[in-house]
Image: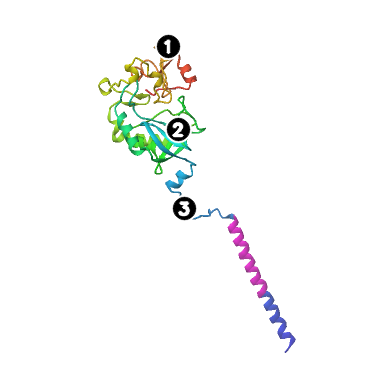
Amino acid sequence: MNKKFFEPLFIFFVMISFILSGCSGSEVAEKVKSDKNSTTPVVQNEKEPSSSEEVNNKNLLSATIVKNIDGDTVEVNLNGKVEKIRMLCVDTPETHHPRLGVQPFGPEASEYTKKILSVGTKIEIEPGIGNGRDKYGRLLAYIYVNGKMFNEMLLEQGLARVAYIYAPNTKYVDEFYAIQKEAQKKGIGIWSIENYAQEDGYHASNNQVTKEKSPASQSGTSVESNYQNNPNDVQESNLDCKGKIKGNANSHIFHVPGGSYYASTNDNIVWFCTEKEALDAGYRKSKR
C-alpha cells in the first residue's frame, strides 16, 4: 500500500497513546494527592470490651473468703496465706465499737457482706496502689465478686458512705460519689436517717445507738487498743489546742468553732491551734 497512507495513521495512533497515557497519569496523580490530603480517619471494626474483660484487664488477684469481720472488712485466703482486707474508700456503720456500740445499719451492712461474701466465696481483689496497708497491717483493696466491685455494691445498697479518701488511692472516687448520690436520692439505708451519715462520720442520737459490752470491758480491760474497724481510728490528741480547730482523724476534715459539724464531731479528734496547722497536716476544711 502507499506509504503516504500509513504515515497519518501512525501519527494518529501515537497521539491517541499519549492522550490515554496522560489521562491515566493524571488520574493516578490526582488519586495520590487526594489520599495524601484526606483527613478522614480510618475506621476499624473494634469490639468494645465487656465489663468482665475490663475486670480481667486489672490483673486482679484470686482469693477465697475465710471469715467475715464487719461490713467493710473480711479475711481471705490469698496464695495460701490468710490476709485481712479493709475495703478501700468506703465505710460501713459500726457493730462492736468500744465507745459507739452498734450504730444504725451496722448489722445490716455486716449481714449483707456475709450474704454476698460468704465463707468459701471465690473473689478477686485489686490492692491499692503500692499494696498499701493500714496501721493494723490490713491490706487495703477493692473486692470483686462475679465481676462486680463489692465496694460499689455497699454504696448502692445505702449500707456504706464514701470515706477515707487518701492519695494515691483515688482511682474510683468519682464513680463512688456518683453511686452514693443515687442512694441519697432514694433515701435508702444510712440515708434514710436525717443527718446520720455525714462527711466526717456517722452521727446517731442516743436513742439510735445500742451500746455493747464486750468481755474485755466487762472484765475491766480496755478494749480501745483492740478495736480495728476504721483504718485511721485514733484517740483524741493534741489537747494543748483543745477548744480551737477540731479535726476528724478518720475523714481528715477539720471544723472551726461555729461550724455546722463542730459540736457533733466527737470521735477521733485531733486538735489544731490554727487552720494553717490543720492544712499543713493534710486536713481540709469542712464545707459547712
Residue under pointer 3: 47
Specify the amino acid type for callout 1.
Leu
Locate the C terminus by quadrant.
top left
Instruction: Sort mark 1 into few (<14), some (14-19) or many (20+) by Cα contacts within 10 Å.
Output: few
- Which label sits in the foreground, 1 or 3? 1
Q: Nearer the viewer, residue 19 or 109?
A: 109
Element class at badge 1: helix
User: Considering only vertical position in the picture, is 284 above or below 74?
Assistant: above
The residue singled out by tag 2 in the image is: 83
Q: Quadrant of residue 188?
A: top left
Residue type at mark 2? Glu
Q: Nearer the viewer, residue 276 or 153?
A: 153
In the picture of the structure, the residue carrying the numbered disc 1 is 239
Residue drawn at point x = 46 percent, y = 31 percent: 139
Locate the N terminus by quadrant: bottom right
Q: CA distance from mark 1 to mark 2?
A: 36 Å
Residue sitting at x 44%, y 36%: 77
Q: Which residues are magenta?
A: 16-36
Asked whether the viewer can see residue 99, the reply is: no
